[in-house]
C-alpha cells in the first residue's frame, strides 16, 4: 500500500479530496480495487459506503478490473444510425471480447455509452480520452494497432 499511502500524503489525507484520491488510485491500478478502498476508508475515517457511492456515481470510476486502454463506443441515436453497431461488432471481433469485457492480456476494455454529446462526429469511438470521429469498420484495425503499439 506504499503507492496508496503516497497518494494520501499528496492529498494531505483530506477526505474532501476523495474524488482526486480515487482518480489517482485508478490511474495506478486502472480500476478501484476493493482492498484499496477499504484501506483508504480506514486511513481517512470515511465510511466505506460513502466511498462506494462516490465510486459508483462517477462513470469514470470502475470497480471492476479494467484494461490499460478503455475503448468506448457511442451507441446513441446519431452514432447508431451512422454505423456504430457495425463498428462495435468489428471491435468485438478484433479484440475477442464482448462489450463490457476486458481482453485476457488486460490491455483493452470495451464498453458502450449512450451519446457522448458530440453527435456531429458520429459514429464516435473514444480510446482513453481521445475521440475518434467518423469511425468506420475499416478504420478499426488501424485504431487498435495504434494503441497496441503504444504499450510500454
Ligand atoms: S449519439 Fe454518439 S455522440 Fe451523440
Image: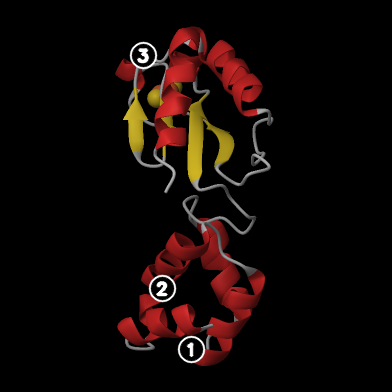
Labels 2 and 1 touching (C-beta < 8 A): yes
> Is residue 11 visible to the viewer in this orientation of the structure?
no
The correct choice, above or below, for 72 with respect to 2 in the image is above
Give the residue number, with chain letter if any, for mark 2: 21
Q: Residue 107's x, y, as percent?
A: 55, 43
Q: Which of marks 2 and 1 is nearer the N terminus?
A: 2
Residue at 45% across, 78% down: 3
Q: Residue 42's x, y, as percent?
A: 57, 90
Could you tell me how far apart the alpha carbons at marks 2 and 1 are, in whole angstroms? Answer: 11 Å
Badge 2: residue crowd in 10 Å (few <14, some 14–19, many ≥20)? many
Could you tell me how far apart the alpha carbons at marks 3 and 2 are, in whole angstroms? Answer: 35 Å
Q: What element carries label 2?
A: helix
Q: Quadrant of ligand 1?
A: top left
Q: Nearer the viewer, residue 60 or 2?
A: 2
Instruction: Kindly identify which numbered label has been placed on residue 139.
Output: none
Labels 3 and 1 touching (C-beta < 8 A): no
- The answer to whether residue 148 is left or right of residue 88 is left
Quadrant (top left, top right, bottom left, bottom right) of the N terminus: bottom right
Give the residue number, with chain letter if any, for mark 3: 134
Q: Which of marks 3 and 2 is nearer the N terminus?
A: 2
Give the residue number, with chain letter if any, for mark 1: 44
Badge 1: residue crowd in 10 Å (few <14, some 14–19, many ≥20)? some
Q: What element carries label 1?
A: helix
Residue at 65% across, 71% down: 34
Residue at 34% across, 20% down: 133
Determine which quarter of the picture holds residue 16: bottom left
Amino acid at each position: 500500500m506504499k503507492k496508496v499511502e503516497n497518494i494520501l500524503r499528496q492529498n494531505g489525507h483530506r477526505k474532501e479530496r476523495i474524488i482526486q484520491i480515487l482518480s489517482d488510485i485508478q490511474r495506478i491500478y486502472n480500476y478501484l480495487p476493493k482492498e484499496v478502498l477499504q484501506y483508504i476508508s480506514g486511513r481517512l475515517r470515511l465510511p466505506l459506503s460513502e466511498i462506494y457511492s462516490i465510486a459508483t456515481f462517477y462513470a469514470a470510476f470502475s470497480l471492476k478490473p479494467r484494461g490499460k486502454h478503455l475503448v468506448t463506443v457511442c451507441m446513441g441515436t446519431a452514432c447508431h444510425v451512422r454505423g456504430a453497431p457495425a463498428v462495435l461488432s468489428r471491435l468485438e471481433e478484433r479484440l475477442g471480447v464482448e462489450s463490457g469485457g476486458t481482453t485476457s492480456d488486460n490491455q483493452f476494455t470495451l464498453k458502450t455509452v449512450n451519446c457522448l454529446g458530440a453527435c456531429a462526429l458520429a459514429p464516435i469511438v473514444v480510446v482513453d480520452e481521445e475521440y475518434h470521429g467518423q469511425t468506420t469498420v475499416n478504420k478499426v484495425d488501424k485504431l487498435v494497432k495504434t494503441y497496441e503499439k503504444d504499450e510500454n
